[in-house]
Amino acid sequence: YKHIMDNYADQVELHYEYQVTPTSFGDEADDSAATGVTLSVSKCSTVDGTSTAPNPEAECEVDTYQTVTGNFLIGADGAARGIANAMEANDSERRSKQSALQRLFGGVKPFKVKRFEDDNKRVYKTVPVKVPSDWRFDLNY
């Protein structure tokens, strides 16, 4: 964050607590946004209007959204990978409309989301601890 703000603040906008839904990738001939990706951006908050940081079950204002177009998109949207999955689905649909020769000799590799197996499973076990009687009991040991 600091590097981006120090070096690219006039070129890059960072927004937090927003839901972003790609509506067009600008790769269709009849697409009016043929120069870049078009996104619907909605502000998210909890029911009482506070920040979403402590509450992952935030509601997003889907009725009031802003349309944004850009040439470059970084989808840092967490484990759900909504943007990357939308890009993969769009590319798959686009490639399905091409002939076998276009897919074979088109020179563009298919977009794929690399999914890694979760090999870092967390296992917790409660371990009883006998605290000596002369120790304080108002602390978390």
Image: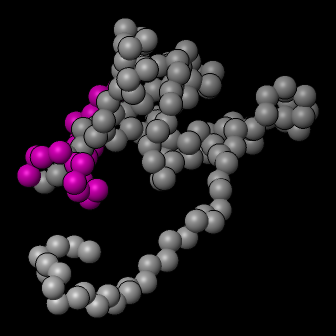
Residue 117, quarter of picture: bottom right
Q: Is residue 92 above or below residue 71?
A: below
Q: Is 69 within the magenta?
A: no
Residue 68, quarter of picture: top left
Q: Residue at x 50, y 41 (%)?
A: 83
**Residue 127 point in image, percent of width and height:** 38, 87
Decide if residue 101 is on the left or right side of residue 90: right
Q: Is 58 within the magenta?
A: yes
Q: Nearer the viewer, residue 72 or 104?
A: 72
The answer to whether residue 126 of the structure is visible from this angle is yes
**Residue 24 point in image, percent of width and height:** 51, 30
Q: Quadrant of the C terminus?
A: bottom left
**Residue 20 point in image, percent of width and height:** 39, 38
Q: Say how the picture is coloured.
A: one colour
Q: Residue at x 44, y 43 (%)?
A: 77
Decide if residue 61 is on the left or right side of residue 7: left
Q: Quadrant of the N terminus?
A: top left
Q: Residue furthest left?
A: 48
Helix, strand or loop: magenta stretch = loop
Decide if residue 136 is on the left or right side of residue 106: left
Q: Residue at x 38, y 85 (%)?
A: 126
Q: Nearer the viewer, residue 9 or 30?
A: 9
Q: Residue furthest top?
A: 10
Decide if residue 40 is on the left or right side of residue 73: left
**Residue 137 point in image, percent of width and height:** 14, 81
Q: Residue at x 34, y 41 (%)?
A: 19
The answer to whether residue 93 of the structure is visible from this angle is no
Q: Is residue 85 above or below residue 11?
A: below
Q: Nearer the viewer, residue 17 or 104?
A: 17
Magenta range is 48-68
Q: Is residue 10 above or below residue 30?
A: above
